[in-house]
Every structure is written in structure tokens, then in C-alpha cells.
Amino acid sequence: MHSKILPMNYPPITSWTWHANLLSVITNYKETNNWLYSNYIQLVCEAGYVIDFFPRSSAKQDCPWTYNQIIRRETIAMLTKDICQFFISCINENNYIFGVFEQSYFFKNCEEPLIHELFIYGYDLEERLFYVADFTFKDTYSYETVSFEQLEAAYRGIGEDQDYNFDGRGGIELLSFYSKTHYEFDVYFVAESIKEYLNGTNTSDRYRMYKNSTAGEYGINVYKAFAAFLKENPDFTDYKPLHLIYDHKVLMLERIKFMGLHGFLRNWEEIHKQYTTIYENIRNARNLFLKKLFRKSAAIDERIIEILHDAHNKEQEVLQLLLDHLIYKDAPSDKYWKDVTGTKLGKE
């Protein structure tokens, strides 16, 4: 086989590599929509500006549609000295590859270290290149190519203490699509997650059997947390917090449409219309922030903070309206359910 490219679909979330990579894979398959739209509702903000979804970086392992293998670098060294051939063999077995690489080798005249995650999804033997995905090439999530020599240098350029993959354990992760599973859309979990979002509930408390609770602001409180941070740090230049909030609105709009078309939401067109206003305002805030990077302006920060405040209030109204119009179909027989929404359960 001279070349192989595994399926990739541009993802609806493009703010963190772990979400973008996972969704690039599973959104090729419509059967994964039930899982996708049951999740990615809750947000968390740490230190005022580090914002992420629930599920977090473990989503690659937790998603029922993926098969994961994490291999220590020492194990790979024991198996082979030819890392490029190892990656080619993995791709031939339909494995995507995720790991931490020294990406300064990918760019001319890059004198500073550039250690970052990389997703590998194909190769071409004749051209001697790998197909890869990351944010470092264009500052947005993009699909690119690197030579065999560049990738080998980038792999070997990571020291043992620099590989932060898998919560610091390190190693190379092989990810493949696992089709022999099933996941029903969980409207009950959606309702519970939306209520936690509106209440600012610390969702990480649910997972204390795995790790300690994560301090921070949750759900709709993320708006106020980032607005306060932005006010105190006018020179802040990372657009990622606003882009993640924007990603959240993109996926919420898709979720509303999905629920409406599949009989889980009454009056969904009106709810979708009202939520579109929130989406457009957050998009404007993100674009204003990008504009600020080229022309500093206190007025721009003030406008962004105003938009975040308005979005906080408007989203409370629209999401409560959504809860009031949900249709709760019968749950799976092995599922225990209690009404977490505080509203009357709507039946078809």
C-alpha cells in the first residue's frame, strides 16, 4: 500500500485538540450523533480564562465509539527503531495517532521549542509525508502534511519529562472507530446537564472517584468569570476562551435542531431562532476580540464585556424555555430516572 488517509470531517468544535480530533473522526458516522448531542453542554472556567467543555480531555477515551490504545514510548522503542514505519503500520490497521511532538521541526527558522499535541491520520510513501492535524500551522485547526524526516525529528525531540499526554503519563495514543456499540440519545441527561449549566453546578464533583474536584466557575457563570478576567487583564491576547464559548453556541444550535427533528423538543424552530441571537452576539464578541489584537481599544473590551453580560441573561431565558418544551420519551428499561428539571414531564 503506497498511501492511506483515514476519514476526517471538519469538526464542530475547534478550540481544543482533544475535542477537534475526536469529532473529526466520529462525525463521519451519523450513528454517533446521539452521543454527541447528549454531551458537550456543561462548561468550566479555571483561573478566569481557561475554559473547556464537559467531557474534557478524557473524551477520546470515554466516547463509546472509539477504541483506544496508549503505548509508552519505551515500549515503542523496544518494538522498533523505525518510528515512521511504526506509524504507517498503525494507520494501515485503521488507527489514528495522537501524541506530543516537538513541532519546531515543521517550520523554517523556528528557533524556539514548539511542544504541542499532533494528530496523524494518513501517509503517502511516494511523497514521504504524513497527513496531520493541529492548530500550530495556521492558528486554526487545519489539516496539513509533514515529511517523514520532520515527523521523526519531532517525535524524538520530546524528552521523557516533556511528554504531558494522558495526564502526564506520556505515550502515544492509537485511536480507531469502534462500530460495535450503541448509544441512545439521552434527553434526560440533556435536561440534567442544562439545569447544571444554568445553576453553575460543579459537575466535576460527580467524578471524584477518578480525580479531585476541579475548582472554577461552571456553566452560565463562565460569562461573568471571563468578563471579570478581561476587565482586570486588558492586555490578554488569547482568543481561545471566546472561541470555545462560540463553539458551545454552534453545538447548542445543532442540538436544538437535532432534538426538534427527532421528536424530543416542541416549538424547536422558535427556540432555535431565539438561541441564534445568542450565537450571533457571541460570534461578534469573538470577532471583536480578534480585531483588538491589531488595534488595542478599551472600548472593544467594554463592548465584549457587555455582550457577555447580555448573553448570560438571554441564555437563562432561552434554556429555561427549552427545558419547558422537552419531550421525555421512555427511557431504556435499565435506566433510573428522576425529574431533574423541576418542570412537568411532557409526553408525546
Image (cartoon, grey):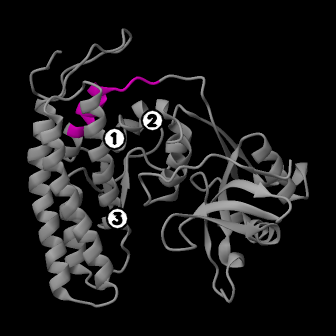
Mark seen at residue 260: none
Q: Is residue 46 left or right of residue 265?
A: right
Which residue carries the number 2 mark? 209
Q: Is residue 51 left or right of residue 135?
A: left
The structure residue drawn at horizontal position 28% and vertical position 73%, both measured from the top left corner, is: 287
Q: Position of residue 157 (x, y in %)?
A: 75, 72
The structure residue drawn at horizontal position 60% and vertical position 23%, both measured from the top left corner, is: 180
Q: Position of residue 304 (x, y in %)?
A: 19, 73
> Does the stretch in magenta take in 167?
no
Q: Residues within 10 Å of mark 3 (few under 14, many from 20)?
A: many
Q: Which residues are the magenta region?
A: 183-194
Q: Earlier in the sequence, mark 3 or mark 2?
A: 2
Q: Amino acid at mark 3?
A: His
Q: Give the tally of numbered discs.
A: 3
Which residue carries the number 1 mark? 205
Please tell me in which quadrant of the rendered image residue 178 appears. Answer: top right
Discs 3/2, front: 3
Q: Does residue 332 sit above or below 309 in this rendering?
A: above
Q: Secondary structure at mark 3?
A: helix
Q: CA distance from mark 3 to mark 2?
A: 31 Å
Q: Secondary structure at mark 2?
A: loop
The structure residue drawn at horizontal position 21% and vertical position 47%, both measured from the top left corner, is: 200
Q: Position of residue 303 (x, y in %)?
A: 14, 76
Answer yes or no: is residue 176 visible. yes
The quadrant of the rendering that contains the C terminus is top left
Q: Residues within 10 Å of mark 2 (few under 14, many from 20)?
A: few
Which residue carries the number 3 mark? 243
